[in-house]
Amino acid sequence: MIRGNGIANGTFMVAINRIGDEAPLRFYGSSFVSDPYGRVLVQAPRDEPAVLVADLDLDARRDWLALFPFLTTAPSRYLRDAQRPDQNATLRQRSLRVPSA
């Protein structure tokens, strides 16, 4: 799921998890860093503490945007509306009004 979010947004992802047991839960470790394509760059073991260090190729995001320009080709009206939460709140309030009988 986390790698999929990174692919969808063209971002590096850092997923952290602890290890060990805390009844009734078992934590499985396996923290990782992935690139915008979802490739795991470095991953921790499942059952022992680890410190992860990854080299991030920041040009990978630019390359991802060239291959999948979703974020740069959205119609401007969608981007404009997304950047104005006050207007979105007003529109939601209007849509929630119940017509009088």
Image (spheres, rainbow, N blue to C red):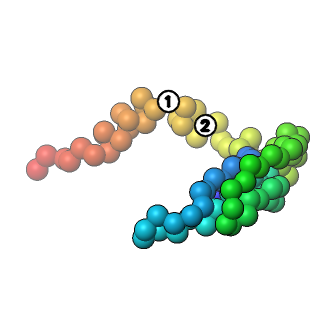
Query: Which of the 4 image quadrants contains residue 7?
Result: bottom right
**Badge 1 amino acid:** Arg
Along the line of sight, which residue is nearer the eye, 21 or 7? 21
Residue 21 placement (x, y as % from top left): 51, 66
Q: Is residue 86 left or right of residue 62?
A: left
Residue 93, label in figure: none
From the viewer's perspective, is residue 19 above or below residue 66? below
From the viewer's perspective, is residue 6 above or below residue 22? above
Q: Is residue 45 left or right of residue 26?
A: right
Judge the density around disc 1: few (<14), some (14-19), many (≥20) Cα neighbours within 10 Å: few
In this rendering, does residue 4 appear at all? Answer: no
Judge the density around disc 2: few (<14), some (14-19), many (≥20) Cα neighbours within 10 Å: few
Q: Quadrant of the N terminus?
A: bottom right
Does dot 2 land on a helix, a strand or a loop? Answer: helix
From the viewer's perspective, is residue 28 above or below residue 70? below
Along the line of sight, which residue is nearer the eye, 85 or 52? 52
Q: Is residue 1 left or right of residue 54?
A: left
Along the line of sight, which residue is nearer the eye, 96 or 23? 23
| Residue beneath the point at 80% across and 56% down | 42
Residue that label 2 marks: 79
Residue 51 placement (x, y as % from top left): 74, 49
Residue 84, label in figure: 1
**Badge 2 amino acid:** Leu
Q: CA distance from mark 1 to mark 2?
A: 9 Å
| Residue beneath the point at 82% across and 47% down | 54
| Residue beneath the point at 64% across and 36% down | 76
Residue 79 placement (x, y as % from top left): 60, 37
Q: Earlier in the sequence, mark 1 or mark 2?
A: 2
